[in-house]
Amino acid sequence: MGSKLTLTLVSESQEGKIGDDWKYTLHAKVYSKGLKGEGKIRIKKHTLGSGDTQPPPGPPEPLVMDAGEAGSNLNIKLNLKATEVDFFKSDSGEHEVAVSMNTPQSGAEPITLDTEIAVGVQESPGFVDQTAVLTLKVQLTSTSD
């Protein structure tokens, strides 16, 4: 029996003083004895002020990916590329995290894991010592047939 992994973007927040116009892409890859599924959630330019926490604009549809056989162990790689959009030169950062979870046995209840991924972005040019951290809260839910 097969399983699926659903990635839902729950919220976004940022701390810093480099600006409040953001866009980002969250890329996910699901491994279980090899690559089983992958996908991206792209968020277009929008306003996210320093110290604010909010649902992502849209909100985007959850990302549903294949996850191999029921009852298997998953290794999930989340890669976040974020850009603070400026008029002259935009500032970007990238970070990747690895998360492990299991899929339920066939017919069992779904398994849910809440996690976060954060990326630091530094203002350019480098002599300006200003940074921001964009944090996404993500919910991963595995289901089996």
Image (tube, rainbow, N blue to C red):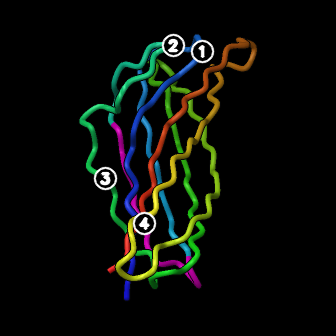
71, 30: nearer the viewer: 71
Residue occupied by mark 4 = 142
Q: Position of residue 116 (x, y in %)?
A: 56, 41
Circle 1 SS class:
strand
Please name the residue that numbered disc 3 is placed on: 62
Tell me the kind of residue under disc 2: Ser
Q: Mark 2 or 4 closer to N-term?
A: 2
Among numbered discs 4 and 1, the one appearing first in the sequence: 1
Task: Determine the CA span between mark 3 and mark 4.
Answer: 13 Å
Q: CA distance from mark 2 to mark 4?
A: 33 Å
Mark on residue 137?
none
In the image, residue 133 lies in the stretch drawn in magenta: no
Magenta stretch? Answer: 32-43
- Quarter of the image where one finds residue 17: top right
Numbered label attached to residue 50: 2
The amino acid pointed to by label 3 is Pro
Count neighbours of disc 2 (C-alpha within 10 A) and say few if under 14, some if 14 to 19, many if 20 or more. Answer: some
Dot 4: few (<14), some (14–19), or many (≥20) neighbours within 10 Å?
many
Give the overall secondary structure of the magenta segment.
strand
